[in-house]
Amino acid sequence: MAIQLGLIGNQTFGEIWVYYKQVALGSAVISSLWLLLFIFLSVNCGNFKITK
């Protein structure tokens, strides 16, 4: 796909590589935030109560 964008589009391979890195970083951040939200809701609202 990167080759197609480089050959057909007017972007260089370096620009495409930077774009893909930004997308991967954004995806990782969003995934980690969803994980934190899931853990918070599981502990506070679910059946996974932490007791001493």
Image (cartoon, rainbow, N blue to C red):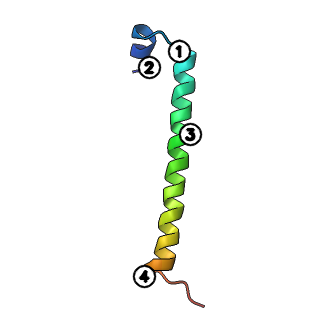
Where residue 2 is drawn, which disc sits there?
2
Could you tell me the amino acid type at mark 2?
Ala
Q: Position of 6 compared to 36: left or right?
A: left
Q: Name the residue under label 4.
A: 47
Where residue 34 is drawn, which disc sits there?
none
Of the image marks 2 and 3, the number of the one nearer the N terminus: 2
Could you tell me the amino acid type at mark 4?
Asn
Q: What element carries label 4?
A: loop
The reply to whether dot 3 and dot 1 touch (C-beta < 8 Å) is no
Could you tell me the amino acid type at mark 3?
Leu
Of the image marks 3 and 1, the number of the one nearer the N terminus: 1
Of the image marks 1 and 2, the number of the one nearer the N terminus: 2
Residue 20 in picture, x, y percent from top left: 51, 29
The quarter of the rendered structure image containing the N terminus is: top left
Q: What element carries label 3?
A: helix
Q: Is mark 1 on a helix, strand or loop?
A: helix
Q: Would you call the spot at circle 2 few (<14 residues within 10 Å), some (14-19), or many (20 or more)?
A: some
Q: Is mark 2 on a helix, strand or loop?
A: helix
Q: In this view, does 6 lie above or below 29?
A: above
Q: Would you call the spot at circle 4 few (<14 residues within 10 Å), some (14-19), or many (20 or more)?
A: few
Residue 26 in picture, x, y percent from top left: 54, 41
Residue 14 in picture, x, y percent from top left: 57, 17
